[in-house]
Amino acid sequence: MTDTDPLVPVLPRQHIETVVIDGQEYEVKVGVFLSNGKSRRARMTPGQRARFATLGLDWAAE
């Protein structure tokens, strides 16, 4: 899959997901996390990029 693959959702930078852990709600800024990761990929270790790649993010495998 690629970043333009219609099966891969494109999240805007301001996208926020609410997750519940032990009954407590937390807002996770997923869009910011992914955007920062992509812009910092050159400084990531191979292991860090591999973890992103297992999530289906093709830019991490490059």
Image (spheres, rainbow, N blue to C red):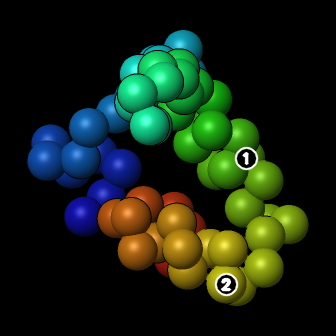
The C terminus - image quarter: bottom right
Q: Amino acid at mark 2?
A: Gly
Task: Tell me if I can see residue 12 in this picture.
Answer: no
Badge 2: residue crowd in 10 Å (few <14, some 14–19, many ≥20): few
From the image, tell me which residue sits under label 1.
39
Q: Amino acid at mark 1?
A: Ser
> In this image, 15 relative to 48: left or right?
left
Q: Secondary structure at mark 2?
A: helix
Front residue (pair 62, 23): 23
Residue drawn at point x = 62 percent, y = 73 percent = 49
Residue 58: percent from the left, percent from the top? Answer: 42, 66
Image height check: is 20 above or below 15? below
Front residue (pair 10, 19): 19
Q: Quadrant of residue 1?
A: bottom left
Image height check: is 21 above or below 18? below
Residue 47: percent from the left, percent from the top? Answer: 67, 84
From the image, tell me which residue sits under label 2.
47
Task: Tell me if I can see residue 42 in this picture.
Answer: yes
> In this image, 18 relative to 31: left or right?
left
> In this image, 35 relative to 2: left or right?
right
Residue lying at the far right in this picture: please name it. Answer: 43
Residue lying at the far top in this picture: please name it. Answer: 14
Tell me, for residue 16, which label it has, or none: none
